[in-house]
Image (spheres, helix red, strand yellow):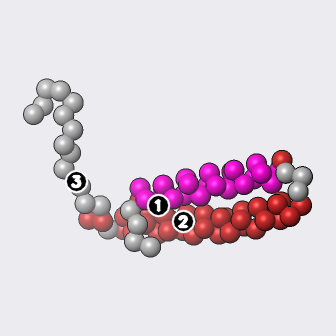
């Protein structure tokens, strides 16, 4: 995927929230076709979630193997006192 760690975590959080909301619908709906549709969506989102977790694991393993994997960025924050 070639995403940054932050992008992977962002997508993982978003996918988890989507699963959570669909689980709420699944458990509160009385409409069988809606429950079936939402269950299929949950299954698809779980596949996406699993893929993102694998990508994040691969990213972290790569960063541990190669110390130069992470490039430090200059900090432009001034917390007072140091200029």
Residue lying at 26% horizontally and 65% vertically, measured from the top left: 68
Query: In terms of secondary structure, what is the magenta stretch mainly?
Result: helix
Is residue 38 located in the magenta-colored stretch of the structure?
Answer: no
For label 2, the residue is: 52
Residue 33 lies, in percent from the top left, at 86, 64
Q: Is 47 left or right of 56, judged from the image as shown?
A: right
Residue lying at 21% horizontally and 30% vertically, measured from the top left: 79
Is residue 23 located in the magenta-colored stretch of the structure?
Answer: yes
How crowded pointer 3 is (Cα within 10 Å; few <14, some 14-19, many 20+) is rated as few
Residue found at the very far top of the displayed protein: 81
Residue 33: mark: none
The N terminus sits in image quarter:
bottom left
How crowded pointer 1 is (Cα within 10 Å; few <14, some 14-19, many 20+) is rated as some
66 or 73: nearer the viewer:
73
Q: Is residue 59 above or below residue 18?
A: below
Tell me the SS state at disc 2.
Answer: helix
For label 3, the residue is: 73
> Which label's residue is closer to the chain start, 2 or 3?
2
Tell me the SS state at disc 3.
Answer: loop
Callout 1 touching callout 2 (CB < 8 Å): yes
Distance from label 3 to label 1 (Cα)? 19 Å
Residue lying at 72% horizontally and 62% vertically, measured from the top left: 42
Give the residues in magenta: 6-27
Is residue 20 something that shows in the picture?
yes
For label 1, the residue is: 8
Q: Is residue 74 above or below residue 63?
A: above
Quarter assignment of residue 6: bottom left
Residue found at the very far bottom of the displayed protein: 1
Callout 3 touching callout 1 (CB < 8 Å): no
Q: Count the marks: how many?
A: 3
């Amino acid at each position: 995927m070639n995403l940054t760690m932050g992008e992977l975590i962002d997508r993982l959080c978003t996918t988890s929230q989507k699963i959570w909301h669909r689980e709420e619908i699944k458990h509160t709906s009385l409409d069988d076709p809606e429950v079936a549709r939402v269950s299929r969506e949950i299954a698809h989102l779980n596949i996406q979630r699993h893929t993102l977790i694998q990508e994040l694991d691969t990213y972290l393993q790569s960063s541990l193997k190669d110390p130069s994997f992470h490039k430090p960025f200059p900090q432009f924050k001034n917390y007072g006192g140091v200029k």
